[in-house]
Amino acid sequence: MDVFMEKIVTKKKDIKDNLITAGIILSTIIVIFISMNIPIIYQMQIGLFIVAGLIYLAYRLITSRNVEYEYVVTNGELDIDKIISRRKRKRIFSSSCKEFDIVARVKSNSFSQSVQSIKNRIDASSSLDSPDAFFATLNYKGEKTLVIFEPDEKMLNNFKFFIARKVLMN
């Protein structure tokens, strides 16, 4: 019998996201103001189209900061997709749980300095501060990789079925 589970996690906005949004709004206002003061644009009466285009571009850039991650577990295979503003989907990770070295909570002793020093990271969690955040380490595409995600209980039990000794629940 095939096992299929999925979960969607929304990334929480941080200070960086808020600063980018403020920068986009501020730069849009400045560009609109400058473009309205260019005589050729004023004479050709295309200013309204430019303003509408800039506002639409700002809207698309701001909403592209809305990120969700979808986890799909099928018979021990974990696929993680990044969904941007519910418009665009991209697969960012796909591997068998049998390749994991360890699966444990981020807020545990297993998340040691050696794990934190892994340079290749895939952060597909709502936040590192989330109590539900887990990490997995593995060799992915020839590099030691740290994957941070938020599986639910059923997903962890499915991983335990395949790699019981490597899944640490505490």
Image (cartoon, rainbow, N blue to C red):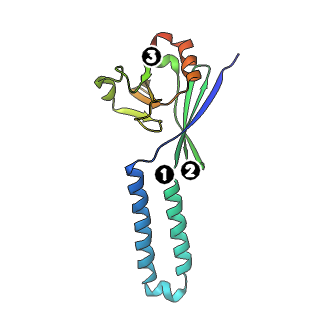
Residue 19 in the image, given as x and y percentages of width and height: 38, 56
Q: Is residue 137 visible?
A: no
Location of the C terminus by quadrant is top left
Judging depth in this view, the residue of 52 and 108 nearest the camera is: 108
Q: Residue at x 44, y 30 (%)?
A: 131
Judging depth in this view, the residue of 116 and 156 nearest the camera is: 156
- Disc tally is 3
Q: Amino acid at mark 2?
A: Ser
Residue under numbered circle 2: 85
Residue under numbered circle 1: 65
Q: Quadrant of residue 109?
A: top left
Q: Amino acid at mark 3?
A: Leu
Residue 140 in the image, given as x and y percentages of width and height: 44, 26
Q: Is residue 95 visible?
A: yes
Q: Is residue 152 left or right of residue 123?
A: right
Q: CA distance from mark 1 to mark 3?
A: 33 Å
Which of pointers 2 and 3 lies earlier in the amino acid sequence?
2
Q: CA distance from mark 1 to mark 2?
A: 7 Å
Q: Residue at x 42, y 84 (%)?
A: 37
Which of pointers 1 and 2 lies earlier in the amino acid sequence?
1
Q: Give the number of the disc on residue 168.
A: 3
> Dot 3, crowdedness within 10 Å: few (<14), some or many (≥20)?
some
Is 106 located above or below residue 10 in the figure?
A: above
Location of the N terminus by quadrant is top right
Q: Give the number of the disc on residue 130.
A: none
Q: CA distance from mark 2 to mark 3?
A: 33 Å
Q: Residue at x 49, y 83 (%)?
A: 41
Secondary structure at badge 1 equals loop
Q: Is residue 112 left or right of residue 130?
A: left
